[in-house]
């Protein structure tokens, strides 16, 4: 299998060809699905080399992780059964009881729950801080700090921290830098190139892109990923062959889908910004957005998520969503179809008032995940709902 496509090749070429068997297996153009849990033993060098699905080394697992690593320009990658599993295992592999993690205040609500649970059950020290500059990190760092965790764009208000400063700060202090790149995708941002150690994705979102797989990804150096894979193997955390097969299929169209979604989100964000019944729009592609300059600096596309607040409170927000015909009210994001929800009832449900305030989430906030539909149709649908 091709572990990595040449850096001279474009992302669409990488998405199609990286990780694919060469020569093709039995002349099949598509990587076959190996619905086998075990393989002939041979002479493995170690426990982790035994060919067994739980040990994350079967053909479908190896092929899809090679493609993922190439897309992120990383040395290696692993897949997990969900995005939260990817976050959990990346953290648990790099933190011991009594050690400290510094997380951005805007991290995803599910990640906050993981961190709070780790603090309670595993004795890991957790603190949250706003990161406007390196000075914020210097002030929040402790002697016990081992990991810094940020997101490429926060969910749902799309904050962007000074990513290069975070990566440089961690390197200077010998810390592990982690970034959840789900919202940006490697099409819009490749954090490894900024100096991050580990890149995390919920592959259920854009990487797969068809709302029919739940999976997670961690990419990074060979050394760090092998350490992580060993922990996955010990705990029996693995992605099944069919999910690997579907994820690999979805990845091939990632560089085609995301630019279309970027463009649709930009059009809708501009429309919402001008609408008199909209109080506020969060989208880093808008020139007046507080994150616009950082977005231009780090991202090659502004993303497909738009968050906005209609005038009138939570009841009006709910009525706007109910009035949509094309966008469906549902959790999750990143698929080819447009989805809409209120984060307070989905991604950040169950968080207390203090955590919601730190994350910037309000009850009247609507999060829009723009799909690949014609953006003019989506905008017209949104206009009808706002007017109704």
Image (cartoon, rainbow, N blue to C red):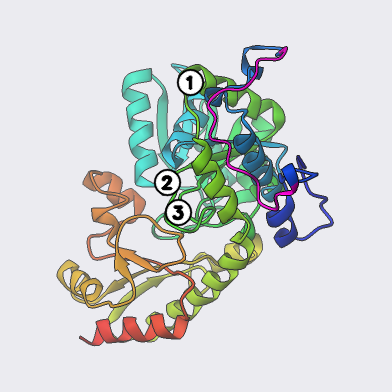
Q: Is residue 369 left or right of residue 36?
A: left
Residue under label 3: 154
x 48%, y 21%: residue:
99
What is the magenta range? 27-43
Image marks 2 and 3: residues in contact by CB distance under 8 Å: yes
Residue under label 1: 99
Image marks 1 and 2: residues in contact by CB distance under 8 Å: no
x 39%, y 58%: residue:
156
| Disc with the residue nearer the chain's start (2 vs 3) | 2
Q: Nearer the viewer, residue 67 or 346?
A: 67
Q: Nearer the viewer, residue 119 or 11?
A: 11
Residue at the extreme left of the image, as rendered: 315
Q: Does the segment drawn in magenta span residue 36?
A: yes
**Which of the two discs, 1 and 3, sits closer to the camera?**
3
> Where residue 318 appears, x then y in whole percent?
20, 69
Residue under label 2: 107
Decide whether the magenta segment is chiefly helix, strand or loop.
Answer: loop
Residue 251 figure quarter: bottom right
> Where residue 86 appears, x then y in whole percent?
49, 36
> Where residue 270 appears, x then y in whole percent?
45, 81
């Amino acid at each position: 299998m091709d572990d990595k496509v040449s850096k001279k090749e474009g992302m669409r070429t990488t998405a199609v060809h990286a990780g694919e068997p060469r020569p093709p297996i039995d002349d099949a153009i598509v990587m076959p699905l190996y619905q086998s849990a075990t393989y002939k033993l041979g002479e493995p060098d170690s426990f982790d080399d035994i060919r067994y699905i739980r040990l994350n080394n079967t053909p479908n697992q190896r092929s899809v992780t090679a493609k993922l690593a190439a897309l992120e320009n990383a040395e290696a990658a692993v897949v997990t059964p969900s995005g939260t599993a990817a976050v959990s295992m990346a953290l648990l592999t790099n933190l011991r009881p009594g050690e400290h993690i510094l997380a951005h205040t805007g991290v995803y609500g599910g990640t906050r729950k993981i961190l709070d649970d780790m603090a309670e059950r595993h004795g890991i020290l957790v603190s949250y801080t706003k990161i406007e500059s390196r000075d914020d990190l210097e002030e929040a760092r402790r002697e016990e700090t081992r990991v810094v965790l940020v997101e490429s764009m926060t969910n749902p208000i799309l904050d962007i921290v000074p990513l290069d400063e975070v990566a440089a700060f961690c390197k200077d202090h010998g810390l592990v830098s982690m970034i959840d790149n789900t919202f940006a995708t490697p099409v819009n941002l490749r954090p490894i190139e900024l100096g991050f150690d580990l890149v995390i994705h919920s592959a259920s979102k854009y990487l797969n892109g068809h709302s029919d797989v739940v999976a997670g990804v961690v990419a990074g150096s060979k050394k760090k990923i092998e350490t992580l894979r060993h922990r996955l193997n010990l705990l029996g955390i693995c992605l099944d062959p069919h999910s690997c097969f579907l994820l690999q299929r979805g990845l091939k169209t990632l560089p085609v889908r995301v630019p279309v979604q970027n463009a649709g989100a930009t059009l809708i964000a501009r429309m919402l910004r001008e609408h008199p019944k909209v109080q506020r729009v969060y989208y880093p592609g808008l020139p007046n957005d507080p994150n616009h300059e950082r977005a231009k600096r780090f991202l090659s596309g502004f993303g497909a998520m738009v968050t906005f607040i209609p005038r009138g409170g939570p009841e009006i927000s709910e009525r706007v969503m109910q009035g949509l015909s094309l966008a469906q009210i549902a959790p999750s994001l990143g698929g080819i179809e447009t989805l809409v929800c209120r984060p307070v009832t989905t991604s950040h449900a169950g968080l207390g008032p203090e955590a919601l305030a730190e994350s910037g989430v309000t009850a009247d906030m609507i999060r829009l995940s723009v799909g690949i539909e014609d953006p003019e149709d989506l905008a017209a649908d949104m206009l009808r709902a706002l007017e109704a």
